[in-house]
Amino acid sequence: MSSVAMERQPAVTRGKARYSYFPLYRLRQLSWSVVRTILVMGICFVILYPLIVKFSVSIMDEMDLYDMTVRYVPKHFTLKNYETVWEYMRYPEAFMNSLKLSLLTSITQLISCTLIGYGFARFNFPLKNLLFGLVIAILVVPPQTIMIPLFLRFRFFDVFGIISALRGETLNLLSTYWPFVFMSATGMGLKNGLYIYIMRQHFRGAPKDLEEAAYIDGAGPFKTFYRIMLPGAIPMMVTVFLFSFVWQWTDTFYSSLFLQKLWVLPTALSSLVPNVSKSYSAEQLGMMVYLSPAYASMLNNTGSILVVIPLAVIYIFAQRYFVESIERSGLTGM
C-alpha cells in the first residue's frame, strides 16, 4: 500500500493495517530463524560427525566392533587404545618434534609472506603482475611434480658450488628442519601462495593516507611498514600463522620427503599400524601377525584424535582472532 493511500485513510484504518502487518512480519522473521538454525545445525553435524565417530570408536573395546547392537555408545568402555597408540606412536617425542617444526615453519612463513605481500601491494616494480601470477600458480601446481628436484636439492645442498669447494662435498640437509626453513623463508613453502595473497589483499585495502602521512613525517618505507602498516595487519597475521601451523602440523608429504629419521606426528600416525603389527609378531616368536582391518582402523582413529586435540585447543583460545581475521581478509567471498 502506497504512502499516499495510507494518508488518505482514517487513523483507525491505518492502525488496523499496521496491526495486521506486524504478525506477518514476525512470522517471516521466525520462519527464517528456524530455517537458518536448521541449516547451521546441519552444517555443524556434517563437520563434527567424523570426529564424533572417531572418538566413539577410540573408547570401544575390540569386541564392540563386531557387535551389531553397538553403534556409537560402547558397551565395553576402555582407554586401552589410547595407551597402545601413546606407546607405539612415541607420542611425547613426536609431539615435541612436530611442535618445534610447526612453530619454526609458521613464524618463518609469517615473516616472509608479510613482507612479500606488502611489496606486491604497495610498490611498483618491473614484471610485478607476472611475478604475482607465478605466486598464484604455486597454489595450482601440485608439489608432487617437483618432489624429485626438491629431494635432490636438499640431499646434495650447495650454493653456487661454494660449499663443495670449501668442504670438499655437499651438505645433506635431510632429516633436519633446514629444508622447511629455506622453503618458508623464500616464499616456496607449504601453501605460501595463499598466505601471500591474504597479506597482499589486506595491504591493498589499507588507506593510503596513513602511508603518505608517514612519508611526510620523514619515515622511510621500512619504518612505515613496521610502525604504521604492521599493527593494523595483526588479524591477518593471526590467520596466516594459524593456517600455516595447522597445515604443517598435519602435513604428510613434506614430512615424509625430508624427515627420514626425525619422528613427527604425521609420520608416527602413518607408521602406527605397521609398528603394532611388528611388535605383536615379535611377541609371537617371529610369527607374522596381521591385525584385522577393523582393529587397524580403530587404532588409526585413536591416533587421529591425539593428533587433532592440540589443534582443537589452539582453536578454542584463538577462535575470536581467527573469525575476525577471516571476516577482514575476504576469504569468505573467494
Image (spheres, rainbow, N blue to C red):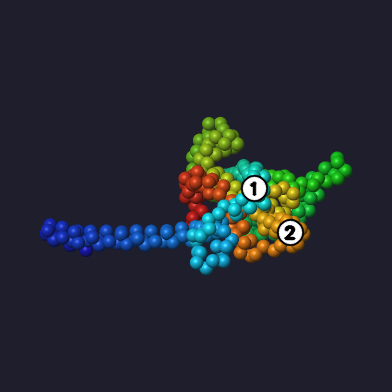
Question: Is residue 133 something one can see in this rendering?
Answer: no
* Element type at mark 2: loop
Q: In which quarter of the image is residue 3?
A: bottom left
Tell me what residue is drawn at x 63 percent, y 61 percent.
Answer: 296
* Element type at mark 1: helix
Instruction: Characterize the local packing of mark 1: few (<14), some (14-19) or many (20 or more) Cα atoms within 10 angstroms.
Output: many
Q: Mark 2 points at which residue?
A: 284
Q: Name the residue under label 1.
A: 91
Question: Residue 248 at x, y = what percent?
Answer: 63, 50
Q: Does label 2 or label 1 sit earlier along the sequence? A: 1
Most extreme residue toward the right is 168
Q: Quadrant of the N terminus?
A: bottom left
Judging depth in this view, the residue of 323 and 8 nearest the camera is 323
Judging depth in this view, the residue of 229 and 21 nearest the camera is 21
Question: Residue 57 at x, y = what percent?
Answer: 55, 59
Tell me what residue is drawn at x 62 percent, y 57 percent.
Answer: 299
Tell me if 55 is positioned left or right of 90 in this view: left
Amino acid marked by disc 2: Gln
Q: Quadrant of residue 147?
A: bottom right
Amino acid marked by disc 1: Tyr
Q: In this view, does 85 lie above or below 21?
A: above
